[in-house]
Image (cartoon, rainbow, N blue to C red):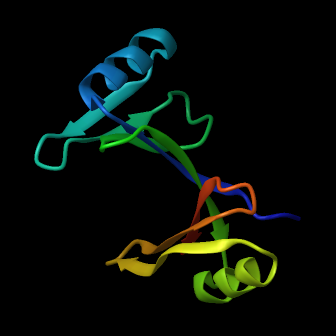
């Protein structure tokens, strides 16, 4: 069995507008932490992939794929022509994240539990 997608992270130039858009169109409940300007998305009914909507200088959508070892996976990615973007970093008590670019330049995340 392959590795599942664990999380999506939508970054917007105007997070409030994006949150309102997705909430209205898809009926998502979004709980915003005003200090971080980041909204945790509840897509409803226990279905779908959890995620969040935050703000940044450019718009992007990153999927986080579950892996057993983020560092080892980054080394394999580099060996196959991918590029490390963010080295593994721990979110205390939750897990470890990292990001890379695939050979086409798309940014993808890794999630180690």
- Residue under the image location 66 percent in, 54 percent down: 5
Left of 60 or right of it: where is 52? left
Query: What residue appears at the point 78 percent right and 84 percent down from the top-left corner?
Result: 79
Residue placed farthest to the right in the image? 1
- Image position of 23 (left or right of 98): left
| In the image: residue 24, left or right of residue 70 | left
Instruction: Locate residue 29: give its quadrant.
Output: top left
Q: Position of residue 56 (x, y in %)?
A: 30, 44
Residue 88 or 104: which is nearer the viewer? 104
Q: How many marks?
A: 0
Residue closer to the observer: 8 or 43: 8
Quick check: 48 above or below 20?
Answer: below
Residue at far left of view = 35
- Residue at 61% in and 58% down: 108
- From the viewer's perspective, is residue 97 above or below residue 51? below
Residue placed most toward the observer, 69 or 27 = 69
- What residue is rendered at 39% in x and 15% in y? 21
Which of the two residues, 97 or 68, is positioned nearer the viewer here?
97
Q: Residue 107 location, x and y as percent?
A: 59, 56
Q: Could you tell me which quadrant the C terminus lies in?
A: bottom right
Residue 96 position (above or below residue 27): below
> Toward which corner of the image does residue 101 lie, by quadrant?
bottom right
Which corner quadrant holds the N terminus? bottom right
The answer to which image quadrant residue 80 occupies is: bottom right
């Amino acid at each position: 069995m392959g590795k599942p997608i664990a999380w999506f992270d939508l970054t917007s130039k105007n997070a409030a507008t994006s949150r309102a858009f997705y909430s209205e169109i898809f009926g998502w409940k979004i709980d915003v932490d005003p200090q971080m300007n980041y909204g945790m998305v509840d897509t409803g009914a226990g279905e779908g992939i959890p995620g969040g909507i935050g703000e940044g200088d450019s718009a992007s959508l990153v999927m986080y794929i579950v892996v057993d070892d983020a560092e080892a996976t980054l080394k394999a990615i580099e060996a196959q022509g991918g590029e490390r973007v963010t080295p593994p970093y721990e979110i205390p008590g939750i897990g470890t994240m990292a990001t890379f670019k695939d050979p086409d330049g798309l940014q993808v995340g890794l999630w180690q539990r």
